[in-house]
Image (spheres, helix red, strand yellow):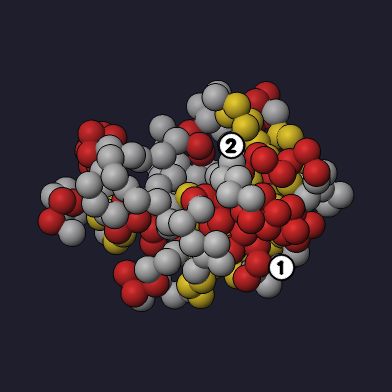
């Protein structure tokens, strides 16, 4: 797997806001995944850096903005607190300046700028652009348009937390496994870090590839 490649990203895309979702509990990790040491900084900083090279606006969705004061972007909170990832997507879309957002989770170390750009360019005539990975659709690495807002709100008001619950009411454009594989053959973009073992494996790979071992003892954070 290749880690986030933030080199040669190119010109910013207009009309899309990059959204980082940092609302998970990190229960299996035992520590806030977004703040883990990574590539000379924190995990979330690498994700923010890549998205900032693609989009003119990047915002962070978090109900604990005080934990991310170091991040140079706007922080917004859920308007439907306690209702999971769908509430986070809604908040990002509600607060974003652009008509569409590209939303990613805060624990995806293998983001691919070429895939992100391709998804963003497919947004015309669609409310959702969603790629398909090895396990199916990837709603936490997808494009959402403002047309989704009322249907997200109806779902949340009904305590429906599944992201896909409103898809049948909007225009969904799918980016197939084959199309994803042409850009990211290993589907690495969708892999995330949930456990200490997964994090250590990531760091060992970084060190093997020449990165500096900047504090592997993440549990002290």
Residue 210 position by quadrant: top left
Label whose residue precedes the other's in the sequence (1 or 2)? 1
Query: In the displayed structure, does residue 180 sit left or right of residue 174?
Result: left
Q: CA distance from mark 1 to mark 2?
A: 22 Å
Residue 119 position by quadrant: top right
Say which mark, if any, is on residue 138.
2
Residue drawn at (48%, 34%) of the image: 188
Element under disc 2: loop
Badge 1 is on which residue? 98
In the image shown, does 87 or 182 lie closer to the viewer? Answer: 87
x%, y% of residue 27? 29, 45
Q: Is residue 198 visible?
A: yes
Q: Residues within 10 Å of mark 1 (few under 14, many from 20)?
A: some
x%, y% of residue 67? 32, 69
1 and 2 marks in contact (CB < 8 Å): no
x%, y% of residue 178? 67, 24
């Amino acid at each position: 797997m290749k880690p986030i490649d933030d080199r040669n990203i190119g010109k910013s895309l207009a009309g899309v806001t990059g959204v980082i979702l940092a609302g998970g509990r990190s229960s299996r990790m035992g520590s806030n995944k977004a703040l883990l040491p990574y590539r000379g900084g924190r995990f979330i900083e690498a994700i923010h850096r890549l998205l900032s090279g693609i989009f003119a606006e990047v915002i962070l969705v978090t109900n604990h903005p005080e934990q991310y004061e170091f991040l140079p972007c706007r922080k917004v909170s859920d308007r439907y607190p306690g209702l999971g990832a769908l509430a986070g997507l809604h908040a990002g879309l509600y607060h974003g300046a652009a008509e569409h957002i590209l939303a990613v989770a805060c624990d995806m170390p293998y983001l691919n700028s070429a895939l992100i750009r391709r998804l963003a360019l497919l947004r015309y005539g669609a409310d959702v652009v969603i790629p398909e990975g090895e396990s199916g659709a990837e709603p936490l690495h997808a494009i959402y348009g403002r047309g989704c807002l009322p249907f997200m709100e109806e779902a949340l008001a009904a305590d429906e937390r599944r992201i896909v619950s409103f898809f049948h009411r909007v225009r969904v454009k799918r980016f197939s496994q084959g199309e994803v594989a042409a850009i990211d053959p290993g589907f690495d973009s969708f892999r995330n870090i949930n456990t200490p073992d997964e994090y250590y494996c990531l760091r060992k790979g970084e060190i093997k590839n020449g990165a500096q071992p900047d504090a592997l003892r993440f549990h002290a954070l």
